[in-house]
Image: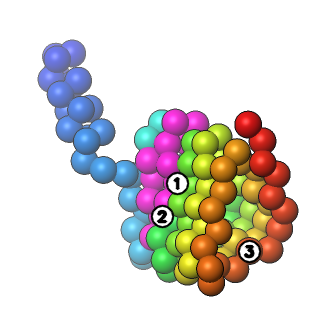
Amino acid sequence: MTDESTNRAADRHASSGPTRVGSTTVLNGDIEAHEDVLVEGRVQGKITLPSGTLTVAKGGRVEAEVRVRALVLHGELKGTVRAAERTVVAETAVMNGDVITPKITIADGARFSGGIRMKE
């Protein structure tokens, strides 16, 4: 494969949407990426997405130390979250742990247990 065809393949992959952990997937380990990740299944470990958004879908469960650019939580998350830009906790979310982020939104109906530290 030439460099040009490798780049085209990478561009197609990058534009195809987030990396998806499917609803029947159970992952025990660490995820490190520079792209968006959608969790519909279960993840236990550490998630590092310095330039990506972690979205936990309704029905998704994460038990991890999370370091991301942004977090959008619809499912369940247990652990410490460090989001560089923002955190959104939707009405269907259950969050147990501390959040360090400059901006946070917690919707009516969301369940949140933990601390919040807003830091630029």
Q: Quadrant of residue 110?
A: bottom right
The amino acid pointed to by label 2 is Val
Q: Residue at x 60, y 73 (%)?
A: 107
CA–CA distance in space, label 2 to label 3: 19 Å
Q: Which residue is mark 3?
A: 112
Is 43 one of the magenta-colored residues?
yes
Quadrant (top left, top right, bottom left, bottom right) of the N terminus: top left
Q: Secondary structure at mark 2?
A: strand
Quarter of the figure with the C terminus: top right
Please, what is the three-letter code of the amino acid marked with disc 3?
A: Phe
| Residue under label 2 | 39
Residue on which disc 1 sits: 54
Magenta-highlighted residues: 36-55
Give coordinates of residue 17: x percent, y percent: 30, 50
Q: Position of residue 52 (x, y in %)?
A: 49, 42
Q: Amino acid at mark 1?
A: Leu
Mark 3 / mark 1, whichever is N-terminal: 1
Q: Residue at x 62, y 84 (%)?
A: 109
Describe residue 70's horizontal placement relative to residue 6 as left or right: right
Vertical placement of 92 versus 46: above or below? below
**Position of residue 85 measured from the top left corner of the image (x, y, whole percent):** 61, 42
Mark 1, other Cα within 10 Å: few <14 / some 14–19 / many ≥20 = many
